[in-house]
Structure formats: structure tokens, C-alpha cells
Amino acid sequence: MPIFSTGGTITEGSDTASGMTSAGKYWGSDSKNDYLGVFRTPLLTSSSSAAGTSNFLTVYSSGHWGCQPIFDLYHITQYYRPSVLAWRCCLDVTNFIAEPLWQGGSNGTGTVGGFVRSGSPKIKIYNDSGSSTTLAHDSGVFGSTSYTDQLSATGHSGQQVHKQNIGFETAGPYFQAYMLIKIRQGGGSRSYFSNSTASNVDTYFTTGGPGFHFRTIGRDTTYHNDQAV
């Protein structure tokens, strides 16, 4: 599905399927809009009695210059009420920062957050030991070192390496939602996908520095410079 604009054509990478399908995928780069890569998770469907949850992403950062990933997260609900929430995020070595993007108020007001019709869609910030917090449309700017894990004190050419686990929740029972991840900078040269284990990816980034593990998106062999571990 090409997208036409005055700046040229933006394609969705190697997958030519409709953007409304339920599978996760790489949607290609969008350099016209300063994105290095755009990824979409599989559709998450809630049960009739509880919200759905998905631990979909782990981000890695190091202390070297330019090795602190900046990326945008879009929580998109397509059923049974539409909504969009967006956060601009950065893992600044040890500190995870998330700032809500203003894309319409909540319930007709000017409160910070996204376009929310009903329910309570969230992203979850957590560490390997299970400590976590959730961010909703009205959470405001978030910054904390409490939920990151250190992989190495000096592993990346003498610099420390940390990681941040991120999940998302649907707005409640019956809802269907997915995440878009738009990488802006600092992501390194390597991404891993659902065919790689968390422990093996941790081992690589202990010395490899910054990067991403898309835990629910399958690897496409046409991706540039990636491999499984």
C-alpha cells in the first residue's frame, strides 16, 4: 500500500498486505518524516471478561554518544471503540522517558493524551523482576530509572548498557488494539524479532550497545542487517 505525498512515495516495506490485517510487520522507513523505521505489532484481542495484554518490546541503550534510542509509540484501538494514544520515548542510558503527544483531547477537553473514546488503553513499563507501572492518556510526562535493568557496567566499549521492557494493554474487555513503533534515532544497527529469545538478545546487546527486540513481530528475511539469536 503506497502512500503518496508531495515529497514522494512511502512504501510499507516488503509486505504488500493491507494495513488492516492482524499480523505484525515492518512497514518500511519514512525518512520524509524523520523516521528510521516503522513497525506494527500483531492485533491484540481482549477476551469478553478482561483487557488484553502484550509484552511487545525491549529497548537497549548505552552510555556512548548517540546510543540513546528515541522512538514514538502509538496505541491504536480499532474495535469496538476507536482511539489513538501516542508517546514520544527515550531510553537515556538508565532513565526511561515518555512524553504524551498532543493529538486531540480526551472527551472533548484539552487534557494531555490522545484521542480516547472510552475505556483505558495503557502502555506498561516493567523490569525483569516484575516491578511495573502503567501510563494512560492522563499520566503526564514520565521519567524513571526504577524499571530499567542493567546488563553491563562497561560492556559496550567501556560504557554501561541498560534495557527497558515495554508492554501494552487494551482498553478493556472486547477491545482490539495494536502498537506502532516509529524509530527516530539512536537505535543502533541491529534489531531482533520474535524468533530470538530474550536471554540471547540480552547477551548480544550487553556488548552491542543500543537496539530493539520486537518480541511479537516475526522476522522477515528481507530486513536489512538483522539476524536471529
Image (cartoon, rainbow, N blue to C red):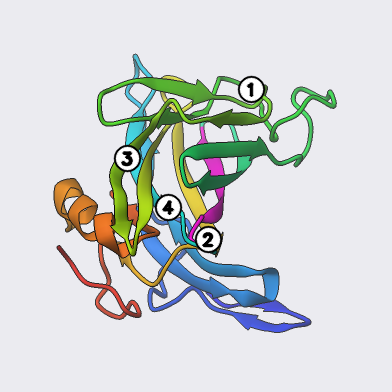
Name the main secondary structure of what is drawn in magenta: strand
Q: Is residue 159 above or below residue 149?
A: below
Q: Which residue is mark 3?
A: 150
Q: Which residue is mark 1?
A: 139
Q: Are marks 2 and 1 in contact (CB under 8 Å)?
A: no
Rendered location of residue 136, percent (x, y): 58, 25
Rendered location of residue 40, percent (x, y): 44, 56
Of mark 2 and mark 3, the one earlier in the sequence is 3
Q: CA distance from mark 2 to mark 3?
A: 22 Å
Of mark 1 and mark 3, the one earlier in the sequence is 1
Question: Relative to 124, is 197 on the left or the right?
Answer: left
Q: Which is more foreground, mark 4 or mark 2?
A: 4
Magenta segment: 67-79
* Number of other residues with Cα within 10 Å of mark 4, as a class: few under 14, some 14 to 19, many 20 or more: many
Q: CA distance from mark 1 to mark 3?
A: 26 Å
Residue at the (84%, 23%) spot, across then down: 109
Residue at the (28%, 73%) spot, across then down: 226
**Label ID, residue 183:** 2
- Amino acid found under the numbered disc labelled 1: Ser
Badge 2 marks a residue whose secondary structure is strand
Q: Which residue is mark 4?
A: 61
Q: Is residue 121 magenta?
A: no
Q: CA distance from mark 4 to mark 2?
A: 13 Å
Q: CA distance from mark 2 to mark 1?
A: 22 Å
Q: Which is more foreground, mark 2 or mark 3?
A: 3
